[in-house]
Image (cartoon, coloured by chain):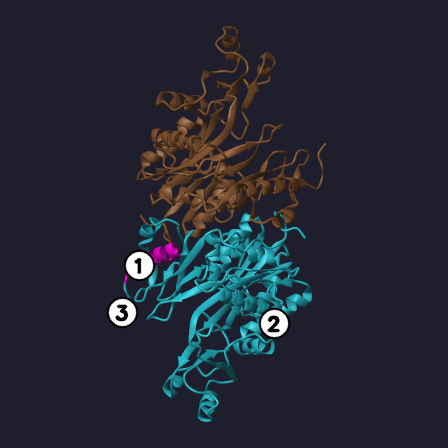
Chain colours: A brown, B cyan
């Protein structure tokens, strides 16, 4: 199969920032693309060859979008899997496969997969409805505190709550969910694994999510992680194990906990380019978007090591601002050496909305980390008018 | 002035590969763009916000394209300069300026500028018509061999000939031209200088053009150049001098000769991103396209040093092939570590047409150079049918 400068068309489900960044690479290799997204202002609307506006969860929309394609990929997991199954039956190559997505889409099923595959993960119980947790607590089956996770559509921190008492339980949506052991972890780590359709596998270095000491929010993603070598090797080993057991094709971002006893536990996975891999655009020999393309096209994988150390900072909408976005301090951070902002192109900001990210690179990870602090202090995603 | 995610629009004259690569950066920063190009299949047609098909040399086309813009730049020098002058009078910022372009567009005027500014360059004579050279030769004003250059529209090796005897003279077009001293050079070098609208200036490392020993064609562009440090410093000094005397805004690629006596002479300049800077996408902290944007937008310039050593190889159409392009061996070169192909997206190949380039990066320049040789040996830009 030839991909470069031919009539071959790659379909992408989702046209957000990940789709947009994937399009830099399809343009670099002159690969034709067709993008489906519900928003007429999707960041990936520009730079694809064809844009279709439509619902990613609607069977017919997804099926019709992709039925004449050779290859289909995703930038978001929440898509209609039944359509993907039927597309696969029709002969469309779908990477990640409907099987992989089915395992991942439901957090209960994802956890079962870890348990059944011997992959280390925090203990958990599954519930058809949140209301059933109450009984389990009363029977002593579950003890406070624990982590509640909605089984479906919970990502980017939504649908996840730490439950410390009966009171906390009452505020939760009554949906299919899991109750997971609360792990007092030392670090949150991530490893991106690439696997191509020929079965070739490569692992990126371990990255470290550094949390804000008070806000309990990821502030910085660092590559390399500042952890002992043996912990890093174990993290890569566990990530590879997930990749092998899933048999996925494309990228797989594996989020991990390093416990205080240096045990590595899998938190969750995303079968696509991921926020934890954004640093790779400036830091790595092969950025995660090019690597995803190589993997799903069945091309040889590129080297996964880094040219330089990198720190990534997310640009999220500041609290109290809503409306037409303004990036305050952007010119100031451009004065700092090795600083690259990425603006996703969403026109409207709102509190905590992901609007872009900034990568800071330097041969020395500590220098990059210091500069990342300056970046964080000097930039703000705001709008002209404060909301009340 | 705000550029990011606003209604500000940047105009680009020319939608070839340079315009296309500039668009990766406008997308990265969500800057609105409008592109003018004569070809409906221009590589930069995709990923700009508006595309206008039209003649870059036509006064009215260029004027109408840009009259409501705040900022206009180019990816090719051969544009209607009178239109740019009138646009400047109307208040449109044009970088590079019409003045800079006027100096550069005509090779006779460009050479005069070097001479008048005390910039070292090979000796030359100007002629209104090639036919006048004959007299000069007979008077002993010019001696064989010399380099003939058409004053206008000579670039990428077209419009340049080495004249060794009277016979060679007869094959030349009878146009405005210069006859230049033939310099037996040790190396051909290039230095990219960035200067923003605030006057801030930064210089990239010296790159080396390595020629094929027989074909007398540039085969590899290497960064850093394998030259003594003092020669490199002198080359950067001369390039900076050209930048200062021109007072340009944006990028300026300065092509230089290093003579066998280690003298640095200016060959010619391009006031825009340039083939000699393509390595920067993978090699540099700030790639040349982002740097050009920073410069013309009046933003702080980024660091110009390299993360890793880099070698660039042009992908040109193989001799004997014409028609729908096929990149033979692309999968083979993707197996090599640190190899990134760029496919410009021109659908038709023809002999020597620039169809793409490949960058090879490695911490060690000699390793990168060895791998670049493998790339060159394994890839070919061909079509299904040989031409006779």
Label 3 in the same subunit as label 2: yes
The residue tagged 2 is B82
- In the image, residue B135 sits, relative to residue B98, either above or below, namely below
Residue B16, horizontal then vertical, whole percent: 47, 61
Q: Is residue B301 above or below residue A55?
A: below
> Which residue is rendered at x = 59% and y = 35% of the image?
A353
Q: Of label 1 and label 2, which has the lower sequence position?
A: 2
Circle 1 sits on which residue? B377
Q: Quadrant of residue A86?
A: top left
Task: Determine the chain carrying the residue at label 3.
Answer: B
**Image location (x, y in percent) of residue B70:** 65, 58
Give me the chain letter of mark 1.
B
On whether disc 1 and disc 2 are found on a single subunit, the reply is yes
Near-viewer residue (A302 or A350): A302
Q: Chain of mark 2?
A: B
Q: Which of pointers 1 and 3 lies earlier in the amino acid sequence?
A: 1
- Prevailing secondary structure of the magenta residues: helix
Q: Is residue A41 visible?
A: no
Report the magenta residues as a range.
Answer: B366-385
Does residue A226 appear left or right of residue B354 in this picture? right
Q: CA distance from mark 3 to mark 2?
A: 43 Å
Q: Residues within 10 Å of mark 2 (few under 14, many from 20)?
A: some
Alpha carbons under labels 1 and 2: distance apart: 46 Å
The circle on residue B388 is: 3
Horizontal side, residue A79 vs residue A370: left or right:
left
- From the image, state whether disc 1 or disc 2 is nearer to you: 1
Whether residue A343 appears in magenta in the rendering, the answer is no
């Amino acid at each position: 199969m030839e991909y470069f400068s031919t009539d071959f068309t790659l379909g992408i489900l989702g046209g957000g920032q990940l789709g947009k960044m994937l399009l830099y690479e399809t343009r670099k290799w002159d690969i034709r693309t067709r993008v489906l997204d519900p928003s007429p202002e999707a960041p990936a609307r520009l730079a694809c060859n064809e844009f279709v506006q439509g619902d990613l969860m609607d069977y017919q929309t997804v099926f019709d979008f992709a039925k004449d394609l050779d290859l289909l990929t995703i930038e978001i997991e929440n898509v209609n899997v039944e359509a993907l199954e039927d597309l696969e039956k029709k002969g469309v190559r779908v990477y990640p496969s409907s099987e992989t997505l089915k395992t991942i889409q439901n957090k209960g099923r994802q956890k079962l997969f870890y348990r059944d595959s011997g992959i280390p993960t925090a203990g958990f119980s599954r519930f058809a409805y949140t209301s059933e947790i109450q009984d389990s607590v009363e029977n002593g089956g579950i003890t406070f505190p624990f982590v509640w996770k909605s089984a479906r559509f919970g990502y980017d921190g939504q649908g996840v709550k730490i439950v410390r008492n009966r009171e906390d339980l009452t505020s939760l949506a009554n949906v299919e969910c899991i109750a997971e052991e609360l792990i007092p972890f030392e670090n949150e780590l991530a490893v991106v694994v690439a696997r191509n359709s020929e079965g070739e596998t490569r692992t990126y270095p371990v990255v470290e999510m550094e949390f804000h000491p008070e806000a309990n929010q990821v502030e910085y993603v660092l590559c390399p992680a500042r952890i002992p070598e043996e912990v890093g090797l174990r993290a890569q080993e566990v990530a590879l194990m997930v990749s092998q057991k899933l048999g996925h094709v494309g990228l797989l971002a594996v989020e991990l906990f390093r416990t205080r006893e240096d045990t590595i536990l899998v938190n969750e996975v995303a079968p696509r380019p991921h926020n934890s891999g954004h640093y790779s655009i400036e830091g790595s020999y092969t950025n995660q978007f090019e690597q995803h393309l190589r993997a799903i096209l069945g091309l040889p994988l590129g080297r996964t090591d880094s040219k330089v150390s990198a720190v990534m900072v997310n640009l999220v909408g500041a609290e109290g601002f809503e409306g037409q976005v303004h990036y305050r301090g952007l010119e100031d951070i451009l004065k700092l050496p090795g600083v690259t902002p990425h603006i996703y192109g969403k026109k409207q900001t709102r509190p905590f909305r992901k609007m872009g990210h900034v990568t800071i690179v330097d041969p020395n990870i500590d220098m990059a980390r210091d500069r990342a602090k300056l970046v964080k202090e000097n930039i703000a995603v705001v709008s002209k008018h404060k909301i009340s």
